[in-house]
Image: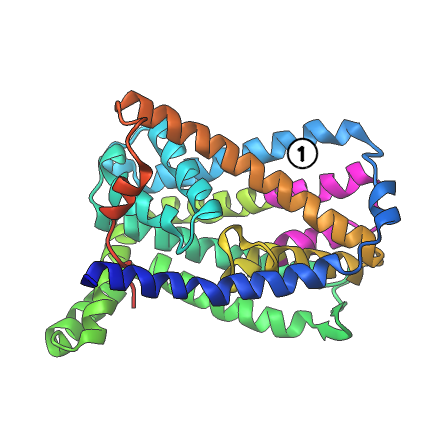
Amino acid sequence: MSEKASGNKRSYWKLIPGFGISAFFLWRTLKSIRLDRLQSMRVEHPAWLPVIIAFVAAGYTLRAYRWYFMLRSSQASFGACFRVLLTSLAANNILPFRIGDFMRIFAYAPDVNAPSSTVFSTVILERLLDIFTLFAFLTAGLWGLHGAANPASFHNHALSAHIVGGITVLAALGLGLLLFGATLLQRLMEKLVAKYGNHPRTKKLSEWALPLFDAVAHLSFIGRIWLLVVSVVVWSCESMIFIATAAALGLVTHARGPFLAAVLSNLSFLVPSAPGGVGPFEITAKQAMMSQGVDGGGAAVYALLVHIIVFFAVTGVGGIAFLLHRKERGSLTKPLSEDLATLPAELPAP
């Protein structure tokens, strides 16, 4: 057996734990749905459907704009950034090992006039901005209207705003140091590389850290603030998708229920699972709604529906963009496996 075939076989074995995690959490979500409860679910307020579509469109357009803003120095076009971003998100939804990120970094870097190292640094910065914003939203969602910590309950365990707030503070300090101390961090990393450059861990760390620091250092102070603002608006649009879906179904709950569902289901992508976050997404959205008084069956159906909305919207638009681009390049009949075979075995991350 060739070394490449052996590597592919090992990669397939790595899929098993993720699919097992997804299957377990999906079972936990679906077991509370009774057939009569499922049949009784209706779109009680169709007027909310255009609202859902509007916020889906606004949210992902703003994500593309944020990435376009990061790549301004490469003279990338907004259209190319939108197409590549949606294509990579769609690929992440249906292919394992986050192949969509590999495609954006290595296969589509020429489309945005940037080297792979630059695209890689923007992907990392996106992730950090998203995680910080989500933790900030989670802290806000767990606090009562009068400033008192009002915990949500998950399987009879309280998720306190004090604990999440501490995590948010640490995340804010780390992100603040990155955004406003990138030059200092870059110098420290260069000294570390000069002293311990032969160590494998140091090499791995420098491969992603130095491009990231360099990408941030090229942004103005106002530009860094603007990225934070856009990130907040992006996740506000995402939250409105969840809130509008609950309103369309006529679920009786405070807005904090779907707000927490939006935050926790997106944080659940940090959990290894099948492509698209199937399983962890549903169970966290369900538990968030149940913590605010929605019955288990209704919360489960809601979690499935909102995931279907987001999944098919992104995958559909991204898939169309991918096929149109392949047609323009004259490679529509070329097997996708040939393109995937050219991607590296792993991202240059520690």
Residue corresponding to mark 1: 52
Residue 257, magenta (yes or no): yes
Q: Position of residue 208 (x, y in %)?
A: 26, 60
Q: Nearer the viewer, residue 10 or 88?
A: 10
Give the position of the C terminus as an image quadrant.
bottom left
Q: Percent position (x, y) of residue 38? A: 82, 46
Residue 146 within the segment the image draws in magenta: no
Q: Residue at x 21, y 66 (%)?
A: 206
Residue 199, placed above or below residue 208: below
Q: Picture coordinates of residue 317 (x, y %)?
A: 49, 31
Q: Identity of the amino acid at label 1?
A: Ile
Quarter holding the N terminus is bottom left
Q: Give the answer, above or below, for where 180 lies relative to 155.
A: above
Left or right of 256 on screen, residue 226: left
Q: Is residue 224 left or right of residue 241?
A: left
Please determine whether, in this image, residue 179 is positioned above or below residue 17: above
The residue shown at (79%, 28%) is 46
Which range of residues does the magenta coloring cover? Answer: 237-264
Report x, y in % for residue 238: 60, 44
